[in-house]
Image: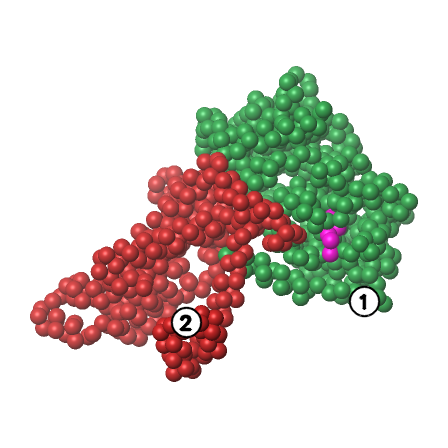
Chain colours: A green, B red
Amino acid sequence: MKKLVSLFLVLALALSVMSFATAEEPFEISILLPEFPADIDFVMDNNPVLEKIQELSGVKLNIQWGPNSTYGDILNTTLADKNPPMLIAATDARAPIIVNSARAGAFWDLTEAVKDEANYPYLAAGNDGVYNNIAVDGHVYGIYRSRAFPRGGIYYRCDIAKEAGIEKTPETLEELTALAEALAAYGKEHDAYALNMCSYTAGTVSVITVAFGAPNTWGVDENGDIYPAHKSPAYLEGLNWLRHLYEIGGIDPNFVQISTSDWDTIERNNKGYMRFDCLDNAHRQQEWFENNAGVEEQIFQTVGPLAKADGTISVWPQNAGFNGEILVTKSVSEADLPKVLKFLDWCNSSDGQTIINAGLEGLTYDVNDAGFRYVPEEKVEEYTKNSQMYHNNINQMGMGVPGNLENPKSDPTYGKKTQLRQRYEDLNAELAQYAVLNPCYPFVSETYTAFGSDLDTRINDAAAQYIAGMIDEDGLRAAWDEWAAMGGDQVTAEFNEAYHAAQN
Amino acid sequence: MAKKQAEAKAIHGTGSEYWRRLLADCKRDKWLYLLLIPGLIYFIVFKYLPMFGIVIAFENYVPYSGVLGSQWVGLKWFEYFFKFPAWIDYLKNTLILSLMNIVLFFPAPIILALLLNEMMNLRYKKLLQTLLYVPHFISIVIVVSITFVMFGPSGIVYKLTERVLGHPINYMGSPDTFRWMIIGQTIWKETGWGTIIFLAALTNVDTQLYEAAMVDGAGRLRRLWHITLPAIRSTIVLMLILRMGSVLDTGYDHLILMANPLNRRVSQTLDVFVYQQGIQSGQFSYASAIGLMKSIISVSLVLASNKIAHMLGEQGLY
C-alpha cells in the first residue's frame, strides 16, 4: 500500500514538472540521465554548454538527473509515470522493467530508424551486432551507449611492486600470483593490502575466474548446452586464488563493508596496490596522483593478457561493447519522433560527440599546437570547476555509435609523464581477441526476470563468504545447490531453450 | 450526509426503523457529524481508494499499459513466490526478528516508564524525559553511521573487545551479531519515545491507592506490583495487540543499511524482498502480491490476538 501511495506521489510530481514546448520556442527534449556525485552542483540556466547544444542542434534540453547510486530505483519509478521524460538513459538494457515496458509498447520501435542511412546517417553507422544485443524480441528500442571493449582487467602500483622486488609486468597467471604475494608481504609492513576489494565483488571475481578459464556468467559445454559459470572448475580455481590471497593477508578482512565510493580513495591513500576492475581507471588514478600528490613517474601499470598454465588466454570483458542505451519513450508524439531521432543522430556526429564528451573549448579544455584537446596545468582548477558546473554528467548521454568522431580528439599523451592512456587503447585492441562473451546476453528468461537479482546475490555472497574464509568448499557447493533449487536450474533450462531455439 | 441518508432510504423504500433512527441522530448531532467529514475524506482518499491498486497483484502490471490495460494473470505471482523455497528463509528471518523485537524491545519502554514514574525530583525527571526522546528524532541512516564508527573495524567497541577477548568480533559483518545489532539500535532509538503512552497511562493511577497502600505498610516494589502494573495492564495489552499487526513488518530501510554479503542470510526479510522486487527490480505486481499476502496475515494476527485478549478478560482493541 505504501508503494502505491508513493507511486501516486511520483506521478503527481512528475506531471507538475513536465512542461510542453510551444510552437515558437525551440523543440524541447526532456531526458533522464544518471548523475555521478561532484563537488559543485550542475547549473541548468545560462549554461554555455547547453546553449551551444541548442544552437548547434536546434533543440532545448531539459535534463533530469537521477543519482547513480539509486538510478535503478529512479528508473523504475520514472517508468511508472504515464508521462516519463522523452529520452531515458537505461544503464541496464536487460532490467525487467525495461524489457516489460518495451514489450508493452512504452518505447518507440527504432528497428527501421537505425537502418535509415538517408535520414540518420550516424545512427545507421552503428554496429548491427550490438543493436541485436540490446534488442527485445528482435526489436531495437534504443540507441546503445558504446564503450571501449573489453575494458575489464588488472592494474597495479608498479612503484610498490619494484620495491617489493618485482620489476616485470605479469604475463602469466603464475607471475600474477608472484606479484600478488610480493605485494601482500610488502603491504603487511605498510598497513596496506595487495588487492583492493570492496562490497562490489562480482567484477573482481569475474576478472580472475575468467582468467583461469571460467565462462563469462554462462558457458556452453561440449554438448552445446548452457551451464552457469560457477559449475566450471576454473571458477573455483579463481576463487581459491582470492581465498589464498585473503589468507596471507593480501585483502582487507572487512572488504564487504567497504562502499564502492571508497574504492578509489583506498588506492589514493596508498592502502591498496592492485585492482581487478576497469583498465581505464589506471590512468585516471595516475593522473590524480600527478595532480594531487606531485607524482612525476609512472606509478600505475596495466596488465595485458595473462597466459594460463597451458598457455591459453581468456579475458573477462567488463561490457559487451556498450553500457546501456538511450530509450525514446512514447511521451514523444509520432509527429515529433523524427525531430527526436534527428537530435540523437546529431549527438553522434562529430560536433555532438565533442561537446557531449568534452564540453567547450576555452571552458573545459584548450587545444594544443598538435591539434589535441588538453587542460593546461594552470587552468586545471578553473576547468574542473567549469566542467562540474556546466558539463559534468552530460557525457552520460554520449553514445558514440559510429565510433569516436571527436574533433579535436583528446591528447593521447595527456598526463605528460605517462603513456598509460595510449597503452589502454592498445591493450583493449589486444585483449578484445581473447574476450569471453556471455552467450545468453540476447535472451530473456522469465524466471531470471523474476528472481535474477536474488539468484545473482546468492552466488556473489557465497563467493565473498568463501574468499573471507567464512565457509569452506562444502559450504560453497551447498550455496550453489541452494541457488539451483531457488530457481537457478529453472533459469538454466529457460536459457537453454532460448539458446537452442536461436541456434536452429 | 442527511440527504444521502434520505436517498438511501428512498432506494431501500421500506424505511426500516434503523434508518429512521440514524437520520434522527444525524439531524440532532449534525455539527458533530460535520466534524467527522474531513477525517472521513482523508481515509477514503488516502486509505481506501489506493486499495483498488491491489488488483495489480493479479496482473502482469506494466506501468505503460496502466492498471486497466495490463494483462490479467490471476494467482501467478503468488504461485511464483511459493515455487522456490527461498520464501521460507524470508519468513523465518522476519519472524525471528519480530519475535526478538517483541521479547527484548517491547518491555523496554514499560520498564523505563516505571523507572521514570518512581522519580521524585520533577525537574530532573522532565530533563531526563526530554533527553530520552532525542534519539527518536535521529534518522536511522545516522544511527547506522554512528554504529559503523563505533562497532566497525576501526571503532572503539571493536578495538576494546579485541583487547579484552584477545580476538575481534566482527559486529557489522557476521550473521550471528546482525539481529542483536538491529535490536540494540531499535532499543537505543525508540525506547525513550515509547515511554510516552505508558507515562500517560500512569498519570491516571489514583494516588489515593498509593497512600492507602503506604499506610498498610507496602514497600515500593509491592506498590509497583499491586497498583501501578495492574493500572496500566490494559494499555500494555492494547499495545501488544497493535504490535501483533506488524509482526511481519520489519521495515526495509534499517535492514538494507545494515546488510552486506556476509550477513544477507539473516538480513533478508519479507519487507526487504518486497522493496528489492518492487522498487529495485521494477516488478510491481510481484511485490504487490507479496505485500498483499503479508497484509492478510497481519490482519488475521490482530483479530486473533484481540480474541485472546477478550478471553483473558481484557478490553482489547474493540
> Where residue A85 sits in the image (x, y, percent)?
71, 56
The kind of residue on which mark 2 rests is Thr
How crowded pointer 2 is (Cα within 10 Å; few <14, some 14-19, many 20+) is rated as few
Which disc number belongs to residue A22?
A: 1
What is the secondary structure assignment of the residue under circle 1? loop
Q: Is residue B20 left or right of residue B78?
A: left
- Residue under label 2: B14
Residue sitting at 86 percent across and 59 percent down?
Answer: A58
**Could you say which quadrant of the image residue A12 lies in?**
bottom right
Q: Residue at x 26, y 69 (%)?
A: B202
Viewer-nearest residue: B99 or B263 = B99
SS of the residue under disc 2:
loop
Q: Chain of mark 1?
A: A
In percent of width and height, residue B166 lies at: 36, 39
- Kindly identify which numbered label has been placed on residue B226: none
Counting other residues with Cα less than 10 Å from the Cα at mark 1, is it few (<14), some (14-19), or many (20 or more)?
A: few
Residue at left 45%, top 25%?
A: A474
Looking at the rendered image, the disc whose residue lies closer to the viewer, 2 or 1, is 2
Q: Which residues are magenta?
A: A326-331
Q: Is residue A415 left or right of residue A483?
A: right
* Residue situated furthest top in the rendering: A310
Pick the residue in front: B248 or A125. Answer: B248
Considering the image in quadrants, where does the C terminus of chain A appear? top right
Q: Chain of mark 2?
A: B
Camera sees residue B59: yes
Q: Is mark 2 in CB contact (under 8 Å) with mark 1?
A: no
Asked whether B220 falls inside the magenta stretch, the response is: no
